[in-house]
Image (cartoon, helix red, strand yellow):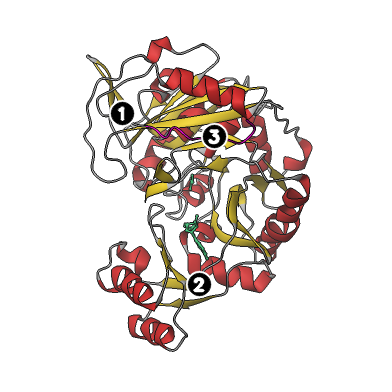
């Protein structure tokens, strides 16, 4: 008998993972809590929200789940993996303690110092006055202020001078715009360079790197406008050669896995460090303890091996025994978003053209819901259109050609995802 797998989330990342799991002969049924109109086509949606751990644990028992595959950030720091494991369910994903790598930047910073992992120099403060005195005691200049806790990707404030730093401290610690996540802040040196994000499957003692995928964070073409969850991605990433990939493994990923194991909190699940390549070398900007979105959409279409077998082996600490093979094809993902995202936007528009998309192109759903009138928009990021090709340019052409066939009121997307990479 095959496995009954639970995913938690409602993004195009979860749809892409459910789509990939569907291909596994070892998977019987997939459940997604809460899911969307796209996951409903490849899995069974479960009406439970990601932070409702009690309800997730109950649903896992009721649905006779035997495998949980962590994709998004919210449930792990709240102990979902610990609770499911205690109930005898095999899990690919970090315990609450191991998830601190992402859920507490203060903890992650101290961990990196303990293990000699390169990061920006930083100080951590839980006292607003002490944080202000520190800033005032320094020469005026650029710094970055980060809410220590999970802040939906919005907790990092890049500041040009002390006035902006003090304003950022006020936002996090006095106005409490990030809630409890901002009660402790990390103030760090502002680095310059270019960014790359790495993903690795981890089983507590072994890490297997995935290919690199590059994300486009800003809402507008040319990287202008507000920060978003990610407006598109492509893989493999330009600029990441074998030498840099080796350095990321040696200086960041391997010491992280070894360090966590040494501290008695082995890291199981997907490790996704955000990196800055500076003139002085590699630095970790942050750890994520999950899959990236929309990086995952561009990665899953390149994975040739069975995703379930990889995650199952990782959950059983035998990741080194399974093949992890990737296609040489390139991939490009374009996010179709609701007008106004990431600020305010309207929901409930009928999405047209979903059936006009080529068979070899994927439309992964995020904010969508099924309705008697059709599939409706139901979030800021609505769909990810993902295409593959022999080159980035070919995948890009195919992704945009298909994205143009989809329409809903006020739909927008960036026109420059993967532009100029290999053209
Ligand atoms: P984080 O949430 O820590 O990954 O930060 C979000 C974004 O802020 C990063 O992708 C960078 O663009 C920027 N950032 C974070 N830390 C720094 C830093 N120390 N120096 C310069 N930019 C940073
Ligand atoms: N795309 C960036 C993230 O998932 O955090």
Given this view, does label 3 or label 1 mark the residue nearer the observer?
Answer: 3
Q: Is residue 125 left or right of residue 412?
A: right
To which residue does mark 1 refer?
Answer: 411
Residue found 39% across the figure and 78% down from its top: 162
Picture mark count: 3
Q: Earlier in the sequence, mark 3 or mark 1?
A: 1
Under circle 2, the secondary element is strand
Under circle 3, the secondary element is loop
Q: Is residue 304 visible?
A: yes
Q: Is residue 82 left or right of residue 320?
A: left
How crowded pointer 2 is (Cα within 10 Å; few <14, some 14-19, many 20+) is rated as some
Q: Quadrant of the C terminus?
A: top right
Above or below, 355 relative to 314: above
Circles 3 and 2, Cβ within 8 Å, touching? The answer is no
Separation of residues labelled 3 and 2 (CA atoms): 32 Å
Quick check: is 247 in the magenta stretch? no
Per the picture, the main secondary structure of the magenta-coloured stretch is loop
Give whichever of 342, 257 is nearer the camera. 342
Q: Position of residue 227 (x, y in %)?
A: 39, 50
Q: Earlier in the sequence, mark 1 or mark 2?
A: 2
Circles 3 and 1, Cβ within 8 Å, touching? The answer is no
To which residue does mark 2 refer?
Answer: 188
Q: Position of residue 371 (x, y in %)?
A: 24, 19
Above or below, 388 relative to 233: above
Residue found 35% across the figure and 23% down from its top: 37
To which residue does mark 3 refer?
Answer: 419
Q: Which residues are magenta?
A: 413-423
Residue found 32% across the figure and 61% down from its top: 178
Q: Position of residue 81 (x, y in %)?
A: 50, 48
Given this view, does label 3 or label 2 mark the residue nearer the observer?
Answer: 3
């Amino acid at each position: 008998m095959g496995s009954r797998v639970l995913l938690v989330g409602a993004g195009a990342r979860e749809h892409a993972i459910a789509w990939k799991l569907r291909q596994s002969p070892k998977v019987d049924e997939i459940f997604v809590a809460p899911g969307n109109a796209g996951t409903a086509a490849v899995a069974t949606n479960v009406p439970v929200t990601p932070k409702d751990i009690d309800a997730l644990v109950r649903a896992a028992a009721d649905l006779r789940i035997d495998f949980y595959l962590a994709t998004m950030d919210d449930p792990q720091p709240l102990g979902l993996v610990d609770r499911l494991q205690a109930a005898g369910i095999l899990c690919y994903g970090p315990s609450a303690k191991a998830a601190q790598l992402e859920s507490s930047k203060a903890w992650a910073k101290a961990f990196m110092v303990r293990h000699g992992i390169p990061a920006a120099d930083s100080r951590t403060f839980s006292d607003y006055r002490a944080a202000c005195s520190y800033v005032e005691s320094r020469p005026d200049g650029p710094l970055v202020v980060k809410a220590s806790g999970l802040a939906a990707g919005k907790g990092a404030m890049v500041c040009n001078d002390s006035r902006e730093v003090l304003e950022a401290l006020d936002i996090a610690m006095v106005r409490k715009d990030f809630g409890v996540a901002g009660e402790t802040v990390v103030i760090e040196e502002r680095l310059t360079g270019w960014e790359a994000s790495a993903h690795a499957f981890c089983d507590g003692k072994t890490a297997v790197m995935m290919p690199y995928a590059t994300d486009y964070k800003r809402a507008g073409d040319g990287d202008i406008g507000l920060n978003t969850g990610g407006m598109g991605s492509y893989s493999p990433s330009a600029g990441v050669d074998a030498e840099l990939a080796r350095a990321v493994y040696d200086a960041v990923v391997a010491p992280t896995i070894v360090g966590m194991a040494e501290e008695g909190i082995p890291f199981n699940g997907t490790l996704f460090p955000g990196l800055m390549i500076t003139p002085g070398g590699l630095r970790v900007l942050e750890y994520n303890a999950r899959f990236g979105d929309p990086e995952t959409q561009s990665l899953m279409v390149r994975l040739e091996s069975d995703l379930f077998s990889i995650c199952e082996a990782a959950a059983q600490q035998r990741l080194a025994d399974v093949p992890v093979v990737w296609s040489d094809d390139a991939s490009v993902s374009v996010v179709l978003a609701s007008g106004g995202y990431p600020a305010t936007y309207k929901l409930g528009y009928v999405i047209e053209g979903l059936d006009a998309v080529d068979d070899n192109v994927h439309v992964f759903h995020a904010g969508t819901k099924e309705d008697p009138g059709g599939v409706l928009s139901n979030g800021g990021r609505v769909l990810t259109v993902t295409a593959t090709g022999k080159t980035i340019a070919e995948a890009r052409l195919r992704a945009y050609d298909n994205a143009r066939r989809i329409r809903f009121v006020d739909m927008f997307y960036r026109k420059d995802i993967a532009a100029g990479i290999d053209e």
